């Protein structure tokens, strides 16, 4: 459970993700360097730090590259790394990757300052970091999902600026109320966009306990497509629909065949690299009320509105723990203070050692 499925509350990373990022840094794959084959990254990670299947390592690398799953992607990829429609990534021998500049500056910049502990790898031939010195609460920003024996985790992504604002407010006043934190960070910010259909009370309960359910729905626009006809366009998907756009269109087609959507005349995926656009064209002369009825049916029967089950389960002091927002901020800020305190104490020790050497020479 601790070594695979759940992220550490301090850096928000699972062991495989931490090891992939560290292996990429050791390979020198910085943002200003050329991309390298993913197979090389997977091979180094597996041979030095992560003695498990190559497919799980590559999958972790792929997810850290996908901007529709992560609030802030950590890997810069070349090639086919999958799509929101559910297409899988190309084989690791075809794709290439390197670190994002954001990852370098925020996740790995302090690695050379000797502020985190290292531990032996599986065969004690290498050293690996116990945790990365991440400068932001990554657990909230990039979220996590994983399943283990008897427990799981499902943490939504959040807006980078809002999380930092909430962290600064907590640092200024550790006794700040959860209501005030939620004014700065009102709720999740899913990578696919969409709308959160939840009351302030529901969100308060989620962030107070670390458990709860949030309804998410796609964002819909009604567009004029000429000749007096209109189209219902889904421009932002609910996060729960990742990999399920084809199923959504099939469900709409089934509703049309069952005469539940008699005004619909065409269904198409008109998405491009600039964004998702699932279009449902309606007959000429369809009224605004009828269009709204169609949209409501899509929310109810085609999973355009779905439930995201929040379960903020993470590793704290080596044990799984479900925690709310204030506890996450407390553990994270204590961790960061500990890093700087460690760095300061090591600097003092070095200065004392230099002073003793000078005195000995004199």
Image (cartoon, helix red, strand yellow):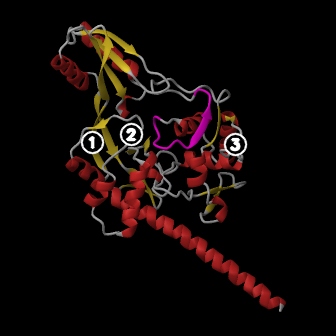
Q: Which residue is mark 2?
A: 190
Instruction: Specify few, some or many for label 2: CA neighbours under 10 Å numbering under 14, 14-19, or 20 or more.
Output: many
Instruction: Specify few, some or many for label 1: CA neighbours under 10 Å numbering under 14, 14-19, or 20 or more.
Output: some
Compared with residue 214, is residue 123 higher up or lower down, i.e. above or below?
below
Q: For the residues carrying marks 3 and 2, which lies nearer the camera in this image?
A: 2
Local SS, label 3: helix
Looking at the image, tell me whether mark 3 or mark 2 is earlier in sequence order: 3
Closest to the observer: 231 or 323? 231
Instruction: Specify few, some or many for label 3: CA neighbours under 10 Å numbering under 14, 14-19, or 20 or more.
Output: some
Q: Which residue is mark 1?
A: 213
Majority SS type along the magenta span: loop
> What residue do we see at 65% from left, 64% from top?
113
Q: Which residues are magenta?
A: 68-80
Rounded to the nearest angstrom, the CA distance separating label 3 from label 1 is: 39 Å
Specify whether 126 is left or right of 101: right
Rounded to the nearest angstrom, the CA distance separating label 2 from label 1 is: 14 Å
């Amino acid at each position: 459970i601790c070594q695979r499925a759940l992220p550490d509350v301090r850096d928000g990373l699972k062991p495989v993700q931490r090891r992939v990022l560290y292996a990429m840094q050791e390979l020198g794959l910085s943002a200003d360097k050329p991309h390298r084959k993913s197979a090389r990254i997977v091979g180094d990670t597996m041979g030095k730090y992560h003695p498990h299947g190559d497919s799980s390592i590559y999958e972790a690398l792929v997810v850290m590259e996908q901007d529709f799953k992560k609030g802030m992607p950590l890997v810069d990829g070349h090639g086919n790394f999958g799509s929101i429609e559910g297409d899988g990534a190309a084989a690791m021998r075809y794709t290439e990757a390197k670190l994002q500049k954001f990852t370098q500056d925020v996740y790995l910049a302090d690695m050379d300052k000797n502020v985190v502990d290292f531990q032996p790898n599986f065969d004690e031939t290498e050293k690996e970091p116990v945790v990365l010195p991440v400068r932001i609460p990554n657990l909230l920003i990039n979220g996590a999902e994983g399943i283990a024996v008897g427990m799981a985790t499902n943490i939504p992504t959040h807006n980078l600026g809002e999380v930092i604002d909430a962290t600064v407010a907590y640092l200024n006043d550790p006794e700040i109320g959860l209501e005030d934190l939620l004014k700065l960070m009102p709720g999740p910010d899913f990578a696919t966009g969409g709308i959160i259909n939840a009351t302030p009370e529901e969100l308060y309960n989620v962030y107070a306990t670390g458990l709860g359910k949030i309804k998410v729905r796609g964002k819909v626009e009604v567009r004029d497509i000429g000749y007096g006809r209109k189209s219902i366009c889904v421009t932002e998907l609910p996060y729960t629909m990742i990999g399920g756009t084809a199923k959504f269109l099939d469900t709409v087609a089934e509703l049309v065949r069952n005469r539940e959507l008699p005004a619909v005349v065409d269904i198409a995926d008109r998405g491009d690299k600039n964004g998702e656009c699932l279009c449902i064209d309606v007959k000429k002369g369809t009224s605004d009320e009828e269009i709204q009825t169609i949209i409501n049916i899509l929310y109810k029967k085609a999973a355009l509105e779905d439930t995201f089950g929040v379960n903020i389960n993470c590793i704290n002091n080596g044990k799984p723990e479900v925690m709310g927002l204030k506890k996450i901020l407390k553990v994270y800020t204590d961790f960061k203070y500990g890093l700087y305190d460690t760095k300061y104490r090591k600097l003092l020790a070095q200065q004392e050692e230099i002073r003793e050497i000078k005195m000995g020479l004199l």
